[in-house]
């Protein structure tokens, strides 16, 4: 399935007058020093590490890796030409604190399910299968929400190894790192469940350079929104 096919599925749920909201489930977001913030939505940001609604998402403490900041800026850098009134990013932090990743992920996904967000970027290959998490993911997909998830960076076939949340449902857009399965990054997971291939090595965004299926997933999400904005606005 290519991006145009996915576009055909999801363009119908995007009204011409509405601002597209993109959920970034990651380590949080911190505005880089000396740089402009990403185009954050006015509300809806959530820190699942301490179950707190965040008014100013750029004040959400990021992990030391800067992963979430890099992901948010990858998406924002590719969409800013359309104008801030066309899209905005909602930050969901699932990192740090005493809660485990599954608990935080379920919490964040449930918040999204109760919102009007239609696009979710989940640039992580998380922990094992969880029934409750799978149910929330299915509920989101059933209502037409697009979810893009990273294939993971262990150089294994997803036909033999299960990676979540990517493999909860075949409707999830699972993204590998590389131009194709034949020219993939050495670390990228692969196999039939990987529906999309995007080059994700050495991606500079938010003052940070990172590589992996996480970065490839963010680029995929941005490209999809670009197409929706170009065709539907």
Image: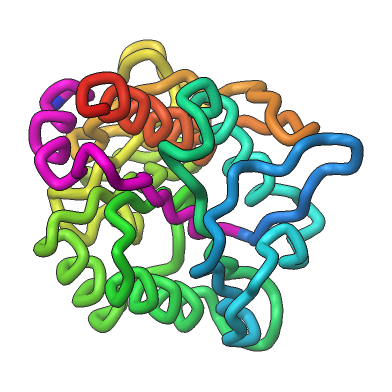
Q: Which residues are magenta?
A: 2-26
> In this figure, which colouring scheme has been used for the structure?
rainbow
Question: Does residue 212 show up?
Answer: no
Where does the image place residue 104, in percent across and percent down from the top left?
50, 78
Where does the image place residue 232, in percent across and percent down from the top left?
21, 28
Where does the image place residue 18, in percent across and percent down from the top left?
30, 47
Where does the image place residue 33, in percent across and percent down from the top left?
89, 42
Magenta stretch holds residue 6: yes
Kindly give the residue lying farthest to the front in the view shown: 17
Above or below 124: residue 158: above
Above or below 219: residue 100: below
Please identify the quadrant where the C terminus is shown. top left
- Of residue 67 and residue 108, the one placed in the foreground of this image is 108
Kindly give the residue lying farthest to the right in the view shown: 34
Question: Residue at the location (28% across, 54% down)?
Answer: 118
The image quarter in which residue 226 lies = top left
Question: Residue at the location (28% across, 72% down)?
Answer: 113
Please identify the quadrant where the N terminus is shown. top left
The image quarter in which residue 46 lies = bottom right
Question: Does residue 105 show up?
Answer: yes
């Amino acid at each position: 399935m290519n991006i145009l096919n996915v576009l055909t599925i999801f363009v119908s749920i995007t009204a011409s007058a509405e601002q597209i909201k993109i959920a970034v489930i990651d380590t949080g977001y911190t505005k880089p020093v000396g740089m402009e913030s990403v185009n954050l939505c006015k509300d809806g940001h959530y820190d699942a590490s301490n179950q707190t609604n965040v008014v100013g998402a750029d004040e959400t403490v990021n992990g030391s890796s800067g992963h979430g900041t890099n992901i948010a800026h990858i998406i924002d850098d590719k969409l800013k030409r359309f104008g801030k009134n066309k899209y905005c990013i909602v930050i969901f932090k699932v990192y740090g604190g005493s809660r485990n990743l599954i608990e935080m992920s379920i919490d964040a996904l449930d918040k999204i399910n109760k919102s009007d967000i239609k696009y979710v970027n989940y640039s992580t290959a998380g922990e094992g299968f969880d029934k409750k998490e799978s149910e929330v993911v299915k509920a989101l997909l059933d209502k037409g929400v697009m979810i893009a998830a990273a294939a993971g960076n262990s150089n294994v076939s997803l036909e033999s190894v299960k990676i979540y949340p990517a493999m909860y449902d075949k409707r999830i857009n699972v993204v590998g790192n590389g131009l194709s399965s034949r020219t993939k990054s050495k670390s990228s997971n692969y196999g039939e469940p990987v529906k999309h291939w995007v080059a994700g090595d050495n991606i500079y965004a938010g003052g940070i350079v990172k590589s992996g299926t996480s970065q490839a997933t963010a680029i995929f999400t941005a490209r999809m929104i670009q197409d929706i904005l170009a065709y539907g606005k």
